[in-house]
């Protein structure tokens, strides 16, 4: 079983809580995502520690700035020893990130296509009239052209991305909800099995694991579902 296909989002309010969750998940957790919530309050040190302990680390910083600034930011991130880093999937941002990563063999750059908390209505409110899938594919194209390693997208668009880009882009999908789990603020959710069947390479799961009474059991149940659905 490829345990690292499950990325567990450490969306918790303190590093101590994150560490407790990591300890509770034990061997079922190989790949952890650190985002805004922990980043300013010890998340970077946690990332370095996890990395030194042999875990994989997804730095979900979603950089979005002028290319030169992104490039310098990513060059600084390289020293943390992470495996995945997100930036928004705009051409200049992606290019800055790829340049900033340089020849680091480990850090993979992922372009965020369209957040899974957005739907067609929310895009329209921001003045974007394009169908969601077209926008996701356009941004995936930007990622491929810039030499990024993959994209973050809803599993609802995974099959279209796979069909267009094959193995040239890794597909990382949040918005995953096992059957019967609470949806929270996500709008476009897919089960773990359906996401893998659609071509996702990695699943990002937060609340269904970290808010479960038994986070290790919740993680193992998802791993079993991934294993059963793998093509
Ligand atoms: O708790 P839940 O499983 O909804 O967490 C999903 C995680 O994936 C969150 O950390 C969220 O920031 C992240 N994410 C997302 N949609 C994206 C990119 C990242 O939900 N497009």
Image (tube, grey):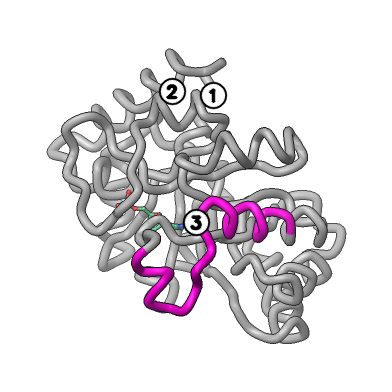
Distance from disc 3 to disc 2, alpha carbons, whole Å, reads 26 Å
Label 3 packing within 10 angstroms: few (<14), some (14-19), many (20+): some
Q: Which mark, residue 226?
A: 2
As drawn, 193 above or below 23:
above
In terms of sequence position, does the residue under pointer 1 or pointer 2 come before the other? 1
Neighbour tally class for label 2: few under 14, some 14-19, many 20 plus, Cα within 10 Å: many
Picture layout, residue 47 above or below residue 83: below
What residue sits 51% from the left and 57% below the top? 131
Q: Quadrant of residue 163?
A: top right
Q: Report the residue marked by disc 1.
A: 2
Q: Position of residue 96 (x, y in %)?
A: 77, 74
Tell me, for residue 132, which label it has, or none.
3
Q: Are marks 1 and 2 in contact (CB under 8 Å)?
A: yes
* Sequence-first disc among 3 and 2: 3
At numbered mark 3, what does the secondary structure look like: helix, strand or loop?
helix
Q: Quadrant of ligand 1?
A: bottom left
């Amino acid at each position: 079983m490829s345990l690292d296909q499950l990325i567990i989002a450490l969306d918790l309010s303190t590093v101590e809580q994150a560490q407790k969750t990591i300890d509770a998940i034990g061997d079922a957790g190989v790949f952890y995502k650190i985002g805004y919530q922990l980043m300013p309050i010890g998340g970077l040190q946690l990332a370095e520690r996890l990395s030194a302990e042999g875990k994989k680390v997804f730095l979900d910083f979603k950089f979005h700035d002028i290319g030169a600034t992104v490039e310098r930011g990513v060059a600084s991130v390289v020293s943390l020893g992470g495996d995945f880093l997100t930036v928004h999937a705009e051409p200049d941002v992606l290019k800055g990130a790829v340049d900033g990563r340089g020849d680091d063999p480990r850090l993979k750059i992922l372009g965020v296509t369209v957040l899974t908390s957005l739907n067609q209505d929310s895009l329209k409110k921001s003045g974007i009239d394009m169908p969601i899938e077209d926008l996701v594919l356009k941004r995936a194209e930007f990622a491929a052209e810039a030499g990024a390693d993959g994209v973050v997208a809803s599993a609802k668009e995974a099959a279209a991305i796979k069909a267009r880009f094959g193995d040239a882009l890794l597909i990382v999908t949040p918005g995953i909800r096992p059957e019967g789990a609470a949806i929270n603020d996500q709008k476009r959710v897919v089960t773990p099995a359906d996401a893998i069947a659609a071509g996702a390479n990695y699943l990002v799961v937060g609340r269904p694991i970290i808010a479960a009474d038994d986070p290790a059991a919740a993680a193992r149940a998802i791993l079993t579902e991934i294993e059963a659905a793998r093509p």
